[in-house]
Every structure is written in structure tokens, then in C-alpha cells.
Amino acid sequence: MTEAARQLRLSILQTAFYGQDANLQSVFSSVEILRVLYDKILNISPKAAEAPQRDYFILSKGQATMGLLALLAEKGFFPIEELQTACNYDSRISMQADRTKVPGIEFSAGSLGHGFPVAAGIAYACRILNQKNHIYVLAGDGEMNEGTMWEAALFAASEKLDNLTLIIDDNHSLDEMLDPGDFTYKLQSFGFDTVTVDGHDEKSLYDVLARPGKRMPQAVIANTVRGYGSEILMKDRSWFHRAPDKEELQRLREDVKIFGI
């Protein structure tokens, strides 16, 4: 784990404590993906958050909102001190981000299964307008149980939207409900340029996301682990949806600091 990924996890824990709400296992599995996108891939900045030529990042996997908010604050999209107000009545920092309130948020996540269709629509609109934007969307493996995701995949492949990249954070949460089969095979059969990668290896993620595209939409299947970055979160499934108290926060922070060392 890189030091930048470690620091982002510590920020997420602190924000979860402030707001007393979190999906820590889900957001921790996405940290390296978010880091690589915002550190090395996306053409976007706080000063040009609405620039017509910007890249778009759509967080379809709404459970990872707290990670995205912590990263946007780090990058200067809004004052980092605002994270301390998380989930307060009058705060714009919440479990499900609102694009009308938070700079840098392109899509108001909430109901799963909608971010990818929206991303496909944006990619199609950019095509019509002859714009060079690239649209990246992060989905969870659980979302792939939604029919809207596969309808969007059919549309994107049919229109050969090579300005669209779907990243699936495959932390295998879906495995306990049904066998999703091989996402790589399925999306290839739909007409995607598809590759599987270790979702916690930042170099591998960068190499995949930065590679030249083909004349078809791209899909990156990122194999991840729920709660990665903390042995406590990885082993205890009660952390799927709860926030730490003061003592738990300290234990989790120490756990993250020694993870992988």
C-alpha cells in the first residue's frame, strides 16, 4: 500500500467518525482505484471543475462516496475542514454526495445501478458534440446485478463508445448472493475491450487505465478485497455499514498505519 493510499484511508476513518456513518469495507476496497484516477489519469482540477474539455468521473458505486469526498477535499475542491461537519443537518458532506452542493461531484449517487447508464449517456453526448472528453465510471460488483447496467453495456458497445471506461470494483460482495460468473467474459461478449487487474496495485491500475484505447468501450475488472488496508475491517463483516466510536477509531487508525509493513 502506498503512503498516499494509507493517508486517504486515515482521512476516511476520521470522516466516518465525525459523521457516525460509513460503509468502510466498501470504500476501503476502492481506495487505490480512486487514487490512481485522481493522481494520474483524470484531466480535472478545482479551478476547471466545470471546464467543457474536462474528463468526467461518475461514482456509480455510491457506498464509496466517503472516499471520493475525502479525496476531493485533499485535492482542494472544497476546504478539508468541512469533512468535520459530515452528516450534520446543514452540511454538504453526506453519505451520498449531492452534485448540486459539492464541487467535483458529477453524479448524485444513491440508488445503485444508475451511474453507468448516466456515464454512457454523457459519453454519447460528447461524441455527438465532437468533444474529446473521456468518461470514467466506478461501479461495484453488486451493481452488476441490476438490469440497467447491462442495458447500458449493450448501448455503449453498440455505439462503440471508445470514450467510456467502466471500472468494476469486484470485491466479491455479490458472490454470497449469486454466482455472477466471469465479468471479463461477459463484457467481452457484449463488445468491450476488457482486462482484469489487481485493484490494489496502483502501478498495474495505471498501466491498464493509461493504455491506448481501441474503437470500443473499455472495461477494467479490478479484483479487490473488502476492507483492504485494515486487518480489522477485512475480518469483521459488521463493518459493512457502521462507524467507529472513539476507541474503535484509534484501533482502526493503528491497524491502517501498520498494514503491509
Image: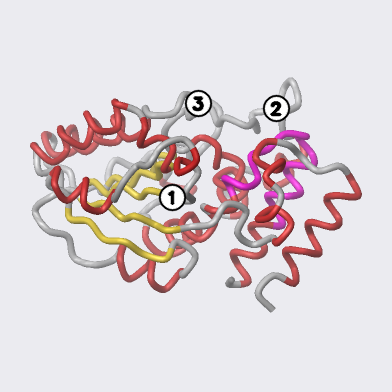
* Residue 27 percent across, percent down from the top left: 58, 47
Which amino acid is tagged 3? Gly
Question: Disc number at residue 2?
Answer: none
Residue at left offset 91%, top offset 50%: 247
The residue nearer to you, when weighing 174 against 169, is 174
Whether residue 54 is visible: no
Residue 18 colored in magenta in the image: yes
Q: Is residue 250 left or right of residue 93?
A: right
Quadrant of the rendering where the C terminus is positioned: bottom right
| 122 over 230 or under it: above or below | above
Question: Disc number at residue 110?
Answer: 3
* Residue 107 percent across, percent down from the top left: 42, 31
SS for dot 2: loop
Question: Magenta residues?
Answer: 10-27
* Residue 5 percent across, percent down from the top left: 59, 64
The residue nearer to you, when weighing 212 against 157, is 157
Residue at left offset 31%, top offset 55%: 220
The residue nearer to you, when weighing 55 against 253, is 253
Residue 126 colored in magenta in the image: no
Residue that extends furthest to the right in the rendered view of this protein:
247
Q: CA distance from mark 1 to mark 3?
A: 17 Å
The residue beneath circle 1 is 169
